[in-house]
Amino acid sequence: MSKRLLGELAAAHAESLIQEWGIRALPIDPFEIAKKHDIVVISKTSDAPGVSGFLMKQGDRFGIIYATHIKSDGFIRFTVGHELGHYFLPGHPEKLFAEGDGVHSSKSGFICDDECEFEADHFAAALLMPEPLFVNAVRESGVGFEAVERLASNCRTSITATAIRYARFAEDPVAVIVSAGNRINYCFMSQPLRDLRNLQWIKKGDALPSRSETHKFNRDEANVREGRHAQAWTSLDLWCDDAPEIELKEDVVGLGSYGRTLTVLFTEDAIEDESDSDKDDDL
């Protein structure tokens, strides 16, 4: 099964639970969900690099720990949602605690290639931003990076998770890119971009375009560390091979202690598929 399908199934499971519980408004409180299922949630210092949270099992009881080094309220809530994913997703408790009681550590935030962590990330995003509620919010939030900020505030979610979810449902051409140094960690694109024929998608491990604002921004580590923000204009063909030469807004923000950069590329203009235009010319 492809990882994309695994993510979609995990998100669908979260959304089915939201519906089952009768939750009909944003923001959604993962702490309250944990409490209603007798899951204790506490914070604790973690010395493990990159670890954001833990799911604990003792007999029939479960608990969640989130790391005290996390300062973002949105990322704390995402981390708790991620651990709830391990609790609720079919097969996760059995796999993570195959030897009985124990503690499972997580690296949440779409940075881990492990399938269980990948599924839990998508579960958390859908739990906090379920499609029916989130799509309505997207339509009322404008476009681009300002829309992401507004949605993150309304959902009380991290800017990164919100941007990824925004790209999933945006009706305009949008690409959300997370990078470190001069390399792309991952990218999510909206359907209008994915629908372009022959477009070479932005992939994990690709080099950042040397003429992009993001490449320039990442050269100064202080930009990332201090959460600075930059804006510029760019072109789709600068980022994607075989793409049309379409002007895009490039919003860049440093993610602080996360050590990465978030880039949102977007335009409000529809992008015409040149292959379709060529067909029209042949008629």
Image (spheres, helix red, strand yellow):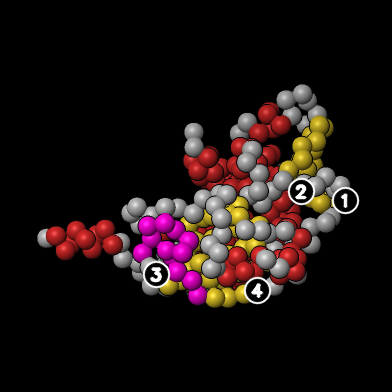
* For marks 4 and 3 on the same chain, the one whose residue lies earlier in the sequence: 4
- Residue at position x 85%, y 48% from top? 46
* CA distance separating discs 2 and 1: 12 Å
Q: Which residue is drawn at 88% across and 50% down?
A: 45
Nearest to the observer: residue 123 or residue 45:
45
In the picture of the structure, the residue carrying the numbered disc 3 is 246
Q: Is residue 140 visible?
A: no
The residue wearing badge 4 is 229
Q: Which of 278 and 256 is in front in this view?
A: 278
Residue 238 counted in the magenta span: yes
Q: In which quarter of the image is residue 278?
A: bottom left
Residue at image mark 1 = 45
In the rendered image, residue 51, in percent from the top left (x then y), is placed at 77, 46
* Three-letter amino acid code at the position of disc 4: His
Q: Which of marks 1 and 3 is in front?
A: 3
Which residue is labeled 2 in the image? 50
Type of amino acid under label 1: Thr
Question: Label 1 crowding class (10 Å Cα cut-off): few <14, some 14-19, many 20+?
Answer: few
> Looking at the image, which residue sits at the far left?
283
Q: What stretch is highlighted in magenta?
A: 233-244
Residue drawn 69% across the image and 48% down it: 108
Secondary element at tag 1:
loop
Helix, strand or loop status at disc 3: loop
Residue 262: where, in percent of width, then height?
Answer: 62, 63
Question: In the rendered structure, does residue 158 fall within the stretch colored magenta?
Answer: no
Q: Earlier in the sequence, mark 2 or mark 1?
A: 1
**Pointer 2 local density, CA inside 10 Å: few below 14, some 14–19, many at least 20:** some
Q: How far apart are marks 4 and 3 (CA)?
A: 23 Å
